[in-house]
Amino acid sequence: MDNKRGNRKSLVGTVVSDKMDKTVVVQVTHRVIHPRYKKFVSRRVKYKAHDSQNNCGLGDRVVIVESRPLSKEKRWRVQETLERAVRV
C-alpha cells in the first residue's frame, strides 16, 4: 500500500459475523500476562470492518487495517483474507 497515509495499525483476527451488508465483525485475540498471577490470559476485542465486496465469510482469518471513520462504529477495513474457513 502507499506510504502517503503514514503507518496504520493492522490486526489479524477471525470473522465472527458477516450478516451485515459490506461489514464484518472481526474478533482479535491478545494474550497478556495477568499482573498478579503471572499466567497468560486471552483478551478478546471485536471490531467492525468494511468488506466492500462481501468476500469474507464466517470463520475466515483476515487482516484489518485502520481507516477513517466509515460509520458510527466502523473504523477498520479488511485488507486481505489469510485463510478461508471450511464451508459446509
Image (tube, rainbow, N blue to C red):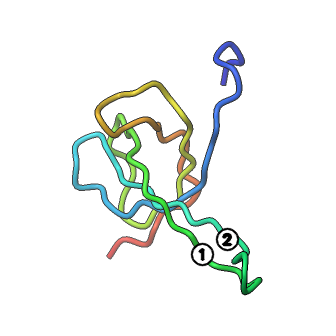
- State the residue position of label 2: 31
Residue 32's place in the image compared with 24, above or below, is: below
Question: x, y (%) of residue 70?
Answer: 35, 28
| Amino acid on which disc 2 is placed | Arg
| Amino acid on which disc 1 is placed | Ser
CB atoms of marks 2 and 1 within 8 Å: yes
Residue farthest to the front, as pictured:
36
- State the residue position of label 1: 42
Q: Which residue is at 60% across, 75% downward?
A: 42
Pick the front one: 26 or 88: 26
Q: CA distance from mark 2 to mark 1?
A: 5 Å
Residue farthest to the top, as pictured:
4
Question: x, y (%) of residue 80?
Answer: 55, 44
Q: Secondary structure at mark 2?
A: strand
Q: Which residue is at 72% across, 86% downward?
A: 37
Question: x, y (%) of residue 69?
Answer: 40, 27
Q: Is residue 30 left or right of residue 38?
A: left
Q: Callout 1 environment at 10 Å: few (<14), some (14 to 19), or many (20+)?
A: few
Q: Callout 2 environment at 10 Å: few (<14), some (14 to 19), or many (20+)?
A: few
Q: Which residue is at 72% across, 75% downward?
A: 35
Residue 39: quarter of image: bottom right
